[in-house]
Image: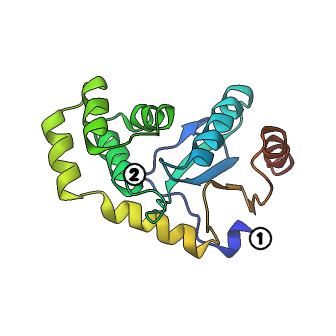
Amino acid sequence: MLLSDYSLNIRNEEYPKGNLSSQNILIEYGDYECPYSRLGYRYVQKFLKEEADLKFIFRHFPIKKKHPHAEMCAEAALCAGDQGKFWEMHDLMFADNQNLSRERLEEFAQELDLDRRKFHVDLDSHIFLSWVQQDFRSGVKNGVNDTPTFFMNETKYEGKLAYKELLAFITNHKLS
């Protein structure tokens, strides 16, 4: 399926990673408590080190029935992002995604030297919940029904989650 059939436009407020001027855009819809999203992100980290012409965007797709803390974690990443530490929080949560309780997120905020009061207030007031919900609705609209789901430029990846297959998909769908 082509991206042009969907609404995967990059929003100005998103947190891209990699080559920010690249026209080759890899989007992952993921869930912080999902072990497969964690594995997929490990692959993405390798791709970003190996591939100079790639921009990566992570979109939140919390599957609350399977992962009760996933939505809160997505909000926590965005709260950290509001303080300039989105990717640092993102990486901490994926590094240790077995116990992502509220207390653990507060520990991560302290470790990242965030303004903990602001983090706490922002998380409690759900100021980024609409962003998370917008990501989720975008995923549903674009045929995402599980995590992780990847899109490279105009194509949805529908293969198994294996490094070589995903790398081949990215390589085959790069713009010239």
Disc 1 secondary structure class: loop
* Residue drawn at x 24%, y 58% as measured from the top left: 126
Residue that numbered label 2 is attached to? 74
Structural crowding at the residue carrying mark 2, measured as other residues with C-alpha within 10 Å and reported as few (<14), some (14–19) or many (≥20): many
Residue that numbered label 1 is attached to? 1
The image quarter in which residue 21 lies: top right
Disc 2 secondary structure class: helix
The residue lying toward the viewer, choosing from 121 and 131, is 121
In the rendered structure, the answer to whether residue 129 lies left or right of residue 158 reads left
Q: Vertical placement of 108 versus 131: above or below?
A: above
* Nearest to viewer (mark 2 / mark 1): 2
In the rendered structure, the answer to whether residue 26 lies left or right of residue 164 reads left
Number of labels in the image equals: 2
Of the 4 image quadrants, the one containing the N terminus is bottom right
* Residue drawn at x 86%, y 48% as measured from the top left: 172
Percent position (x, y) of residue 41?
61, 40
Residue type at mark 1: give it.
Met
The residue lying toward the viewer, choosing from 4 and 68, is 68
In the rendered structure, the answer to whether residue 169 lies left or right of residue 20 reads right
Percent position (x, y) of residue 140?
56, 72
Percent position (x, y) of residue 85?
36, 34
* Residue drawn at x 32%, y 46% as measured from the top left: 76
How far apart are the two marked residues, 2 and 1, measured between alpha carbons? 27 Å
Percent position (x, y) of residue 30?
55, 53
